[in-house]
Image (cartoon, rainbow, N blue to C red):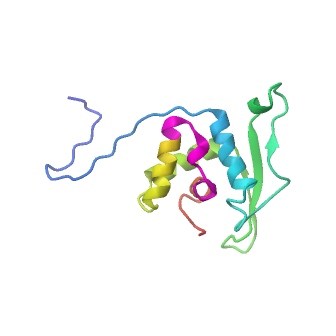
Amino acid sequence: MDNNIEHGSPCATSYTIEVPCRVTGEFLDDIIITAVEDGGISYWADVCGGVKRDETHESFREGEVTAEIWDLQADTGIPKLYNLDRITIIKGIRALLAADKIHFSIKDYVGRAVSTSDSCDIDIECADCIIQFALFGEIVYG
């Protein structure tokens, strides 16, 4: 018997199973690009200077993508600056997939994309949700 499994009551109807998945840097970069350049977050955030790529790599696709955004609708009335990078996106994906209060289709698209490391299922709505979960721990806008 595996001691790492949490046992519910005999009548438990659901269990949480965590399955590790590996994704590429390109997959994570694509989410930033979709959110920033394709307009996924443009209704609540202002992008500072667009997407930036680490130019120290010889291959165009090897350089990490980052972006700085301002949350223009912050509760305090004072815009707040955030940095988007690969670690931020991983944090957002983990939070989104663990969340209870997210539409099942968003969770399904993101889960499928992560399990295959294929960003084709990440549209602007999914990218927006990933960014919001990364920065706020929940969906604040939209």
Residue at x 67%, y 59% (from the top left corner): 40
**107 with respect to 118 (left or right):** left
Start-end of magenta stretch: 114-128
In terms of secondary structure, what is the magenta stretch mainly? helix
**In which image quadrant can residue 17 be found?**
top left
**13 with respect to 70 (left or right):** left
Residue at x 77%, y 52% (from the top left corner): 68
Q: Where residue 83 sits in the image (x, y, percent)?
A: 73, 50
Quadrant of the snapshot with the N terminus:
top left
**16 with respect to 103 (left or right):** left
Q: Where residue 62 sits in the image (x, y, percent)?
A: 75, 29
Quadrant of the snapshot with the C terminus:
bottom right
Judging depth in this view, the residue of 97 and 119 nearest the camera is 119
Is 125 magenta? The answer is: yes
Residue at x 65%, y 47% (from the top left corner): 31
Is 52 magenta? The answer is: no
Q: Which residue lies furthest to the front in this view?
A: 120
Q: Where residue 54 sits in the image (x, y, percent)?
A: 81, 35
Residue at x 70%, y 67% (from the top left corner): 44
Q: Where residue 93 sits in the image (x, y, percent)?
A: 54, 47
Judging depth in this view, the residue of 77 and 15 nearest the camera is 15
Q: Residue furthest top?
A: 58
- Residue 8 visible? The answer is yes
